[in-house]
Image (tube, grey):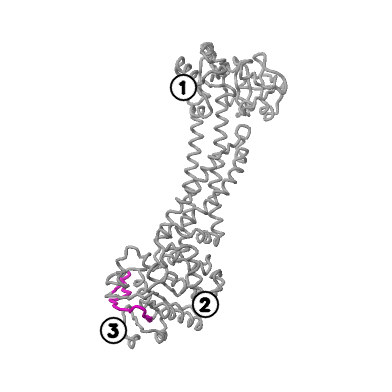
Amino acid sequence: MAGARVVAEHVSRRYGRALVLDDVSLEIAAGELVALSGRSGSGKTTLLQLLGSLDAPTSGTIRVDDIEVQRLTSPAQFRRDVVGFVFQLHYLLPSLSAQQNIELPLVAAHVGRSERAQRAQALLEEVGLGDRARALPSDLSGGERQRVAVARALAGRPRLILADEPTGALDSSAAARVFKLLADVRDNHGTTVVVASHDQSLAKHTDRALHIVDGRLVEPAEADEPARVIA
Amino acid sequence: MTSLLQTLSSIRHRPGRTLLTAIGTALGIATIVALLAVGAGAQRSAGQFFHLGPADFGLFQKDAADPTTSVLPTSMIPKLERLPGVASATPFVLIVEAVPHNPGVVVFGATPHNFQVDRMVFSAGHMYTNNHEAVIGNGTARQMHVGVGDTLTVKHHKLRIVGIYHIGVAYEDTGAFIPLPVAQSITGRQDEATTIPVLLKVGARPKQVKHEIERHFSGLTVLTDSDESLRLGANGDLVSKAALVIAVLALVIGGIGVMNTELMAVIERRSEFALLSAVGWSGRQIAWRVLVEGVVTTVIGAAIGLLLGVIGAHYLVKILGASEFVSPHITAWALGRALLIGVLIGVLGGLYPAWRAAHVSPARVLAQH
């Protein structure tokens, strides 16, 4: 499945008096692997949430392919069919096995039980956990849980993966493996992948890096300086 | 429809909360079952009481506040017996709370020979033959520790016990019979009766005879079955209404209990619902999951409650000291109603938590973590 083209124009998000995102405009090509770097509280998470319809912008427009995200009548369906999320914490449901966790988006999409199991098993193989289908999250290591979370994000065959600090809670080797997994997703499926991280070194392994400072996108060289809008 | 198995696994994963919620529901349901069973038993006993054994009809004064306050003239009996289809009619005077220290003993004033008392089987002694004698039921004898030769006091009138009988009707076996003139004297109502049981001729059509009686005697209520007996008096209404009030209270209290527990669970599991929302579950799917969890938990509780209620009903009548008169009457309908109330508690108690779960903001919750 081809990746999605993402366009944001003059997007701002305000929570009360706090302006968290300030007039952000960007364009991400289909199948691109993009790093979104910035310090904690810079607005990375908010931007990803807006792109994925978890939240709505105060002003501006966001388009994913032909879909105007802020005008969705059923954001749940958009998230089910178009987007896959990976969070810093895995958010696996503790009562469900690895396979059942991966099946969650498919349950929402009314996919039949046998097809769900088949797709979940294939994804477990893809993330290198083919033999851990029945394991509960409590039986998995931190890196394994996050790989299951990546598999869950892929279950709905999304065109856009939004990963928010996916390696933030992992040691360096587990982090490298999870990041490689996300890169493989782009390479193998052509999925557009946006990875938010406070680790600027991540940008070396992506097609392009976007830097965000105090809610504004800036040139890479100026990431540690006062913001200068680039788009 | 979301996966029921996944929902159930969530319940299994929280055995402590599931058990506590189920116990809360079980206690509510057990209370309903026990009270409905005791209420139904009381209704049945009351039905027997007002119907008086083998009689086809029981005649009472119309609009009496309570059947025991009914007053009928005994002069109507010969006219009654002349009606087609009527085999026999006999006057009864009912006196309640007349035996000192034994308020539950109902005293019946009756003639020594009629179709009612002729059914008495005497385990000791015989029927009274004069106005200074009385007979008591075997239940009364056991309860009061008295026998033939002892004295029965009915509102200061002392009567010698000459017989101990068994009829097979709870209220009569735990009561006493005294001569009709004595009972009329005690109540100050000469030539009057509380009720007149009527026996029909073989082959007579009850509806037709009832119609004839009502046509000839205005101001009468003709009771033909136990349920009808209950409609006559305030006591019957009271029992029915009390059962209804208890069921409604259980529904409200149980519902609030389940809602509170479910709400706590929703607050504790906000990140779970936020995640479900993030991976594409609609609000309706999330709400359904919470509702199903609530209903499954309360149905488990209801099942436990049914069992506790059946056991509790028997203990309840013992604790109330009413086991002599009332035996719990457990019907499939009573159990069905309790189960239905359990499901209703689950649904009503789960509605608000389900709504809250459906409206968890994934952006806010997942960002907080």
The image's mark for residue A128 is: 2
Picture coordinates of residue A30, whole percent (x, y):
34, 78
In magenta stretch: residue A16? yes
Q: Earlier in the sequence, mark 2 or mark 3?
A: 2
In the displayed structure, B178 sits above or below A158; it is: above
Q: Label 2: chain?
A: A
Q: Are marks 3 and 1 on the same chain?
A: no
Read off the residue under disc 1: B62
Q: Is residue B269 left or right of residue A65?
A: right
Read off the residue under disc 3: A228
Secondary structure character of the magenta stretch overall: strand
Are the residues flagged by discs 2 and 1 in contact, CB closer than 8 Å? no
Q: Secondary structure at mark 1?
A: loop
Q: CA distance from mark 2 to mark 1?
A: 86 Å
Q: Which residues are magenta?
A: A11-37
In the displayed structure, B182 sits above or below B36; it is: above
Visible residue check, residue A136: yes
Category of crowding for the residue at label 2, using alpha-carbon neighbours closer than 10 angstroms: few (below 14), some (14–19), many (at least 20): some
Are the residues flagged by discs 2 and 3 in contact, CB closer than 8 Å? no
Q: Nearer the viewer, residue B150 or A115?
A: A115
In magenta stretch: residue A32? yes
What's the amino acid at mark 1? Lys
**Number of marks present in the image shown:** 3
Q: CA distance from mark 2 to mark 3?
A: 42 Å
